[in-house]
Amino acid sequence: MRFLIMAAIRWVVLAYIVVIGCATIARGNEQPLSRIAIERATVAAVDSASVKAQPTVLGLKGQSSDWVVVEFSHPKPSNDDWIGVFSPSGFSSEICQPEYYGDLPPYLCTSPIKFQYANFNNADYNRSGKGLLRLQLINQREDFSFALFSGGLSAPKLIAISNKVSFQNPKAPVYPRLAQGKSWNEMTVTWTSGYSIKEAIPFVEWGHKGGNQMLSPAGTLTFSRNSMCGSPARTVGWRDPGYIHTSFLKELWPDSLYTYRLGHRLLDGTHIWSKSYSFRASPYPGQDSVQRVVIFGDMGKAEIDGSDEYGNYEQASLYTTNQLIKELDSIDMVIHIGDLSYANGYLSQWDQLTQQIEPIASTVPYMIGSGNHERDWPGSGSFYGHNDSGGECGVPTQTMFYVPAENRAKLWYSTDYGMFRFCIADTEQDWRPGTEQYKFIEQCLSSVDRSKQPWLIFLAHRVLGYSSASWYEIMMGSYGEPMGRDGLEELWQKYKVDLAVFGHIHSYERTCPIYQNRCVQDGSNLYTGQFNATTHVIVGGGGAMLSPFRATVPYWSFFRDYDFGFSKLTALNHSTLLFEYKKSRDGKVYDHFTISRDYRDIMACSIDNCPRTTLAV
């Protein structure tokens, strides 16, 4: 009887942990805009209330972001009052269908693009009813208005609406994103504008710095509300994405510095230009020079004016972004392995992300991977039938960013950078043995010439390897994705993959060189000689709410850090690779190791990767 009672107590405790854990996880990944029940909004206009925004014209110096001062007053103020920023400004005039048959159409069917409580930095608001907010706006192709609501976020009542505010040229080309092309000497430039191909012809003017400039045409894509798989992306979160243009700059000279600017030729023959940018072309595959690549996942975006935040949700993404900008002179490429914007169906947030990363992505290739918050939606073909993408089902991701994949709807690909070969998998689509993606992974790993590109890196969003995060313990009772290592671990060992790098877990962890749950070699800060097994690294602390670890540290977990940060790989030459883990808050190195290995060490035989031999003479 005592045994049964103790067992029952254990089950109750476990159930409590699961419930609390799930609630914490759900809250940690919640898009702040989703807490606004805008579809329940009603009109409660108050004649004596007012909202005024100035200046009314933004970007007079050609900039794509600017500040607005919003003054407001309410005769009956409360702690629940808030200001919503809407774009387009005529948000109350949009007509949308109810999500479910039989429901009445909502009065408001457009979420604000950002919001802030009226008493934020207005300590006297509840007494005086007067307040002032200073908000940053970015160019998002439409005008803006500001609305005062009472009733909190769950039962909003529209009190007053401001005048309109607009950028001088709302359609201007903005937020360029560089990416590696399908060949080593090709760079792609993707950007956003408000110009359709019926209004203007998009192109890039580019060339060697200080040399003759040439023009390259750009293709144009967009997507519609009907491309979305569900709510909120199809309903209150929908916002027109504008037009996404991509140009291919080819036959680049290795390591050469190029300048470029984005252009649109209007029908009357005049041109609209962006400001000028620059980038350095990729090194030739196998080139012996110092090459530096930053890798992280799960960053998201945040507002520098403090709006939209609950418990500093994603605020640390600004720490990561700002630190990378500081170090940009010593970074050659960035790989963001999934969970990019955490838009979760609120399409305006993709503009916010591309604007935030522009100083980085306009200067070095910004490669991406697919995460659950980009792709997952029931019945959409995703491997996991969850609703993490908020109905986006991968469409904005594969449109907003270029990747050198054969099919951008299947977001797995390889990319070479000097002495590196990166094999980037898509964990949101089936990777198991026998699938199309598994065949790609093996082809990517097996086709590299290790005498030229000795550093072989596997990347994916979810942890297909090893993790001691409590999330996996609570949700799955495992040390990583179920079926994650099935088949793949044999490939990593067979083809001697140096590093397997993952996100999804919002913290940092490094294992020993491990194979089949066993440390083939002790964890260390220096590995020399022949390959023994793959080291697994979790770098999901890019900015979203942190993920705790299990209380017990597994024997294979060599270093763990519950903080925000990113990793940096530096190929010093064909024999030496430096790995560093840096914290976003100060840029200091908190974990590091070096691999020192000659080509003969790569070719040497170790566990489960020995080629057949013969006794013939």
Image: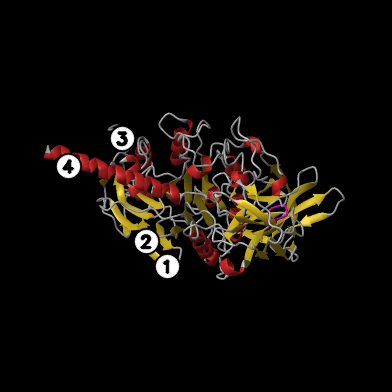
Q: Amino acid at mark 2?
A: His
- Secondary element at image label 1: loop
Q: Amino acid at mark 1?
A: Lys
- Secondary element at image label 4: helix
Prevalent SS, magenta region = loop
Q: Percent from the top left, x then y, of residue 340?
A: 53, 50
Residue 527 shown left or right of residue 458 in the figure: left
Q: CA distance from mark 2 to mark 3?
A: 37 Å
Q: CA distance from mark 4 to mark 3?
A: 58 Å
The segment highlighted magenta reads 139-146
Sequence-first disc among 4 and 3: 4
- Secondary element at image label 3: loop
- Please name the residue that numbered disc 2 is placed on: 592
Sequence-first disc among 2 and 4: 4
Residue 31 at least partly seen:
yes
Q: Amino acid at mark 3?
A: Thr
- Please name the residue that numbered disc 3 is placed on: 613
Q: CA distance from mark 2 to mark 4?
A: 45 Å
Please say if 209 is above or below 16: below
- Please name the residue that numbered disc 1 is placed on: 588
Nearer the observer, 569 or 511: 511
- Please name the residue that numbered disc 4 is placed on: 6
Disc 2, disc 3: CB below 8 Å? no
Disc 4, disc 3: CB below 8 Å? no
Residue that protrudes farthest toward the right in the picture: 268
